[in-house]
Amino acid sequence: MSKSQETWNKKEREKQKQKERKEKAERMHERKENAKKGKSLEEMMAYVDENGNISNSPPDPKKKKEIKLEEIQIGVPKRLSVDAGELVRTGTVTYYNDSKGYGFITDQENQQRVFVHVNSCRDAIKEQSKVSFEIEMGPKGASAINVTCTG
């Protein structure tokens, strides 16, 4: 009688595994032999020049800028105090829709168009009337608040 088929399959699988291990070891040995030696420290160094660009050569010490530690600001700079008179601006109502309750004011100083709503008006306004107002930044941009007629 002959040996079972299962024994033959086990031997074949074992041979295949041995062959794969041997090939893997050969590939690893070949990689180690062909691998280049690491670069020297000088070849790996990178420098940043005065403009912030990366280069192979060290920066020129003559172009070095001294920065005082006290001048560096981290975070939001402190807000300067502003007079209440500087916040009030003057302008002309260029468009106003009474039924919808909104319009636009053109600032006299910088010709900026500012949105105005009826709820932020202290006096009744109409087109071409001179007004004084303050600017507040809303989610959609600048809007006028505390609007009063001046003439």
Image (cartoon, rainbow, N blue to C red):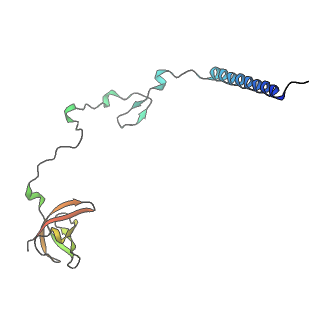
Q: Position of residue 98 (x, y in %)?
A: 20, 78
- Residue 34 placement, left or right of 145: right
* Residue nearest the observer in this picture, 107 or 7: 7
- Residue 111 placement, left or right of 124: right
The residue at the far front in this view is 1
Q: Residue at x 35, y 29 (%)?
A: 60
As displayed, is residue 135 above or below residue 82? below
Q: Residue at x 27, y 60 (%)?
A: 139
Q: Position of residue 150 (x, y in %)?
A: 8, 71
Res. 12 image quadrant: top right
Res. 22 image quadrant: top right
Res. 121 image quadrant: bottom left
Q: Position of residue 136 (x, y in %)?
A: 19, 60
* Residue nearest the observer in this picture, 97 or 44: 97
As displayed, is residue 77 above or below residue 29? below
* Residue nearest the observer in this picture, 67 or 136: 136
The image quadrant where one finds the C terminus is bottom left
- Residue 66 placement, left or right of 52: left
The image quadrant where one finds the N terminus is top right
As displayed, is residue 99 above or below residue 43? below
